[in-house]
Image (cartoon, rainbow, N blue to C red):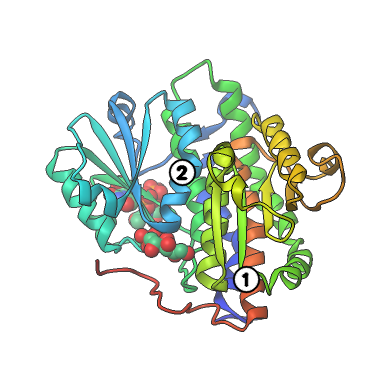
Amino acid sequence: KKGKYDHFMQKEIHEQPDSLTTTMRGRLTRGRESKMKTVVLGGLKDHLRTIRRSRRIIFIGCGTSYNAALAARPIIEELSGVPVTMELASDLVDRQGPIYREDTAVFVSQSGETADTLQALEYAKSNGALCVGITNTVGSAIARGTHCGVHINAGCEIGVASTKAYTSQIAVMTMVALALGDDSISCRVRREAIIDDLFDLPSKVKEVLKLDTEMKELAKLLMEEQSLLIFGRGYNYATALEGALKVKEVALMHSEGILAGEMKHGPLALVDETLPIIVIATCDATFSKQQSVIQQLQARKGRLIVMCTKGDALSSCSSGACRFIEVPPVQDCLQPIINIIPLQLLAYHLTVLRGYNVDQPRNLAKSVTTQ
Ligand code: UD1
Ligand code: F6R
């Protein structure tokens, strides 16, 4: 079943142009005239009005699914105008945090069987919130237990480390944002630009997958390290968290995703000439802030690897003393889908080089059905 690949994780990383195509199939249409660009999510269309009118949207999930929701949060807020809050399922349950009838609770889960997320679902339901599922598994407990939802249709994911489900979750939540913003004239140009880039996404993902050899070289350079920091902000705060999660769970290397805006509030103390740091600085509204983060890290002799937009290497890091990962540009809200791919490849190659089990990392299970 692995075909030409050595591991399921590797197969699933390289499958992403196809899994994203299936995720979007039948849901996006683009006619010859621009006004014909539409998004139809069969499972949500009767509930959009209720969601738009809700007092807030609460995203609830664990691990990678939480990170996917974090990546989609800004575009949901921008296009729907509804405040979005984030909850790790176990923390919501521990706190018994307030949830009201006027809330929309969105449960994100690849397996649809995660115990913490299911418990949070029961809790939100008993509080009267509209419960929406974003799941990969038809017939799963979360798909059945939610009032409505969207299947991500990424295909079966076997590697314990979630890869293709992550990118499909972000694509689906971006489509949810588009559907929620459907009645607004003011964001029409923005919506259409995003729809155009969703159509182009599979080819852009193919392009970024060509970094495979480069990421293997980078993995050779980093394989003996104890630790790896990843700095991101804005849309790519989630990329930093998810990249670090991949590195720690499969390559068994300590890694931390850090919000770049928090750098001076603690993490800067760790920076020296030995610790490798990946800085995500692709082109978006936060680019100039990331440039200044890079300058400050360089001033402390940080060992930098800068992820930047293709052709932008010099403007993102003018002194030239760093390595680069150059990725193709897409609309800012879709950039996390592109940017995670080199980090998935890096985590994969680090794991193989360090001699660990790729598809079944130590101590982890694919579906966490106990608490
Ligand atoms: C549905 C069909 C798909 C068909 C398409 C044709 C299913 C599973 N999907 O896809 O095979 O090609 O119509 O129009 O039969 N739901 C939840 N919670 C979740 C996920 C989904 O309640 O977590 C509900 C949805 O509200 C919806 C149903 O499950 O009622 C199917 O969802 P989805 O597969 O996303 O709908 P379509 O894309 O319309
Ligand atoms: C990491 C990973 C886990 C899961 C988490 C939630 O690669 O796979 O962090 O994302 O256990 O699982 P689901 O999405 O099935 O609820």
For disc 1, the marked residue is 348
Disc 1 or 2, which lies upstream in sequence? 2
Q: Is residue 146 visible?
A: yes
Q: Residue at x 21, y 46 (%)?
A: 95
Q: Which mark is residue 70?
A: 2
Question: How many residues crowd around disc 2 within 10 Å: few (fewer than 14), some, or many (20 or more)?
Answer: many
Instruction: Classify the position of the C terminus by image quarter.
Output: bottom left
- Contact between marks 1 and 2 (CB within 8 A): the answer is no
- The structure residue drawn at horizontal position 45% and vertical position 57%, both measured from the top left corner, is 64
The amino acid on which the numbered mark 2 sits, given as a three-letter code, is Leu
Give coordinates of residue 210: x percent, y percent: 76, 61
Q: Position of residue 348 (x, y in %)?
A: 62, 71
Q: CA distance from mark 1 to mark 2?
A: 23 Å
The answer to whether the residue bearing label 1 lies less than 8 angstroms from the nearest atom of ligand 2 is: no
**Identity of the residue drawn at 65% across and 47% down:** 201
Q: Secondary structure at mark 2?
A: helix
Quadrant position of residue 221: bottom right
